[in-house]
Amino acid sequence: MSKICHKIHQLYNAMKKHSLPQWFNEQGIPKNGIYILFEKGELAHSADRIVRIGTHTGNNKLWSRLKEHLNENKDRSIFRKNIGRALLNKDKDPFIEQWNKKNLAKKNKKALDPNSVEFIKQEEIEKRINEIEKRVTEYIIDNISFVVFQIDDKDKRLELESKIISTVSLCDECKPSPDWLGLSSPKEKIRKSGLWLVNKLWKSPLSEKDLKELKNILENAGHSEQRSKLLISKYQGCLLGLAIGDALGAPVEFLRLQEIKKRYGKDGITDFHEWRGFKPGSYTDDTQMSLATAVGCIRAYQRWSERGICHPASVVHRRYLEWLESQNNPVQRRGPGNTCLSALQSGEMGTIEEKINDSKGCGGVMRTAPVGLAFSSGRAFQEGAEYAAITHGHPSGYLTAGFLSGMISYIIEGKTLAEAIDLCIGQLIKYDEHSETLEKIELAQKLSVSQKSIEESIQTIGEGWVGEEALAISVYCSLKFSDNWGRGTLVAVNHSGDSDSTGSITGAILGTLLGVELIPGKWVRDVEESGRIKRIANDMFSIFKNGKKLSLEEYPPF
Ligand SMILES: [Mg+2]
């Protein structure tokens, strides 16, 4: 694998991707620069695979160059021409010969008698070409997304474009999928390189020095600012998403679905409602303990940065004990789980090696989403599992927690939901006694693409009282509605079972994936302690992603 190719894939995948309808909108497109295209279904380096790199020669012409790939004139865009060639070649359509030539039909017609055979022939050619142009446009709109970055100097642009092309074409991990349209291209270079390109392939790739320069260019052009904004939105989406999902589910925990519908209408519960005397938007123990985990991670980091030594799970445990204290206050008592209470009251701290009990309740997994905001994907799974094992000794009680922490971390690092799940499965199977969790996750994956109704699918997985069911229901709802926070989370809430926990876990996953802007604004505003939760998310971002040292009066080390 080419390390540099891996790095540029990470860099470009983290940038704001434009989809094609936005090509009509010049906003955010620099005047001069390089564009990188991605194509649906094409993956490499656990990210979207680069399928074309391009630039322009004329000054201030990036925007018009990009538009040429959408204007229906193949003779102005070799990219369009090549897509058309592949489509025709795939269909074994002999018209490809005509498509390869310059389109002169319109011009030719002018000199001809409209009644002549030749005129009619030219007209037919023109019609066919227009049809194919439309197909090419459709293909591009449906499949292509892109990122752009600014480089004003023309020579630098051409040099870097050429080196990026060579880097990707030389990388043996950047292979097209078996279904890639380019494999139907008559051009051997396209098939062989996996790129919609025939020039500048397999020459001199980027050096470490070039890569550094490229990174600097991206940072100076404000792309890192763009990335910070995106990440802050994901951090807030995770913590606010989990609190809102929890508050939505709180009134219907323990209710059968039929009962929920009877009480709240045929669509079930669709807004905040009062529960056990707490006003609408109040969260439960799930959010209390998740925030305890978040603050525990912040404190652990602070302890580590001040003393150079720290066992994060012990710091988190201390925070859980503070939470236990708070349960003496009736206003703070929000339906705590018995396992959490008794394990913390025992005076012992459970670990994966020294199991505290045999509980696999969902009290572990419901509180470990924030771990994924604090640790990188290599470590989040293990940390999350450790924090759950403080109170839950059964593997399905703590491995599910590790799984959730891992997923959140992978999503923060730019992975898609499906990739994050697969990568976590890869980590899960390294642990003993993982089969129960694995089976439920695989069931959720299967159900999410089946024809089975949502109600039946969730029932098939279970009710969510135990870790593996709560996680799998949330994975199912997230996969099913990966572009719609509201629908995914409400589906996770409206079932017969542990609605606040499944709502909370799903809310965290989708909130991280989609960012806080895609959570309905009124819930973000009205959920209990919205401001404090947002602040914790911002602090976590500053500490764990920006490497900033904050004055953490709110999070004093012990
Ligand atoms: Mg609860």
Image (tube, grey):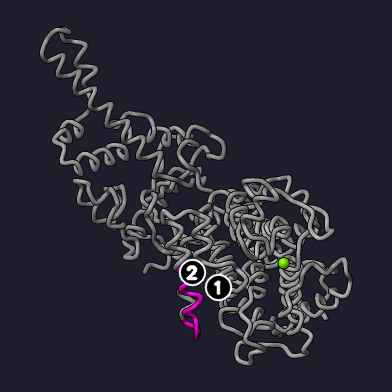
- Give the residues drawn in magenta, as a range: 430-442
Name the N-terminal-most of marks 2 and 1.
2
Q: Which label number is shown at residue 441?
A: 2
Please name whichever residue, 452 or 298, is drawn nearer the observer in this view of the structure.
452
Q: Secondary structure at mark 1?
A: helix
- Residue most extreme to the left: 117
Disc 2 marks a residue whose amino acid type is Ile
Is any atom of residue 481 visible in this view?
yes
Q: Secondary structure at mark 2?
A: helix
Residue 176 placement: quadrant: bottom left
Disc 1 marks a residue whose amino acid type is Glu
Q: Which label number is shown at residue 468?
A: 1
Queried whether the magenta region covers residue 437, the answer comes back as yes
Image point 57% across, 62% down: which residue?
474
Residue 122 lies left or right of residue 411; in this view the side is left
Residue 80 pos. (x, y %): 31, 37
Provide the major secondary structure of the magenta segment.
helix
Queried whether the magenta region covers residue 98, the answer comes back as no
Image point 55% across, 73% down: which residue?
468
- CB contact under 8 Å: marks 2 and 1: yes
Residue 203 placement: quadrant: bottom left
Residue 163 pos. (x, y %): 38, 55
Image point 35% across, 53% down: which residue?
165
Quarter that holds the C terminus: bottom right
